[in-house]
Amino acid sequence: MSRAPVYERLLSVPAFTPPEVRPLISAERIAARVNELAAQITRDYAGRSVVLLSVLKGSFVFAADLARAIDLPIRMEFLGVRSYGDDTKSSGVVQITQDLTRPVTGDDLVIVEDIIDTGLTISYLREQLRGRNPASVKVAALLHKPARIQREVEIDYLGFTIDDVFVVGYGLDYAERYRNLPYLGVLDPSQPGAK
Ligand code: IMP
Ligand code: MG
């Protein structure tokens, strides 16, 4: 069965464009890239099943699209993590706000992240999850900002590499806003609506 109708419906929703957000990556480009990553995962895990571990809240949109484009039996888990205040700078402190609902012992895990910025969150999560004895752990990240990396991280499935800008939309927020933008945009903090 074709998966296109889901995306067509989503792409036909008119996108509101707040003046403080400069569009960076369109919904169409995101959908195409997410489909490619899903095809890669489908090939890599052929004949097996995968646990997609969505890191909340930022990855919820990416995880939902990725999950529906993967042609394998999957299980979804969600891990609530807080690494930011309402600011655009990483605090470096990772707090687990919601744990998994089931053990992942012996499972093939794919951690689904919105963005790897300093790398502190994903390094911490990898370490935490290793202690739960999964069969394997890989990382799928929609975005990577190499300019700010503090910990070397291996990203197995990467959507886009971006410059050192603060992005919102497609699940990513600034002070809990903009998560529902269907595209990715750069937030201009000097614009009145951004505060
Ligand atoms: P890291 O620990 O610095 O790699 O930060 C990862 C988390 O910070 C991500 O999962 C996001 O929630 C948040 N973050 C980092 N950069 C941005 C951004 O440009 N926009 C929105 N959230 C971001
Ligand atoms: Mg966030």
Image (tube, rainbow, N blue to C red):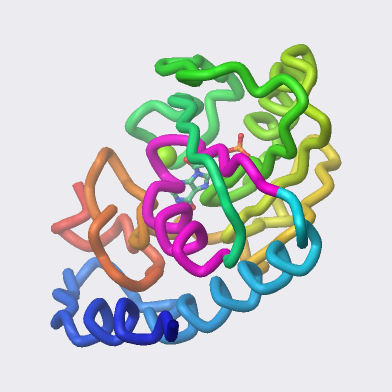
Q: Quadrant of the N terminus?
A: bottom left
Tally of marks = 0
The answer to which quarter of the image holds residue 194 is bottom left
The answer to which quarter of the image holds residue 151 is top right
The answer to which quarter of the image holds residue 47 is bottom right
- Residue 68 lies in the magenta stretch: yes
* Coordinates of residue 100 in the picture (x, y in percent): 50, 20
The residue positioned 22% from the left and 48% from the top of the image is 177
In this view, the residue in front, 164 or 76, is 76
What residue range appears in magenta? 49-70
In this view, the residue in front, 27 or 44, is 44
Q: Is residue 6 above or below residue 124?
A: below
* Coordinates of residue 20 in the picture (x, y in percent): 24, 66
* Coordinates of residue 52 in the picture (x, y in percent): 57, 43
* Coordinates of residue 136 in the picture (x, y in percent): 82, 36
The residue positioned 16% from the left and 80% from the top of the image is 13
The residue positioned 63% from the left and 46% from the top of the image is 117
Query: Quick check: 11 left or right of 89?
Result: left
- Residue 67 lies in the magenta stretch: yes
The residue positioned 35% from the left and 73% from the top of the image is 183
Query: Quick check: 31 left or right of 131?
Result: left
Q: Is residue 5 above or below residue 56?
A: below
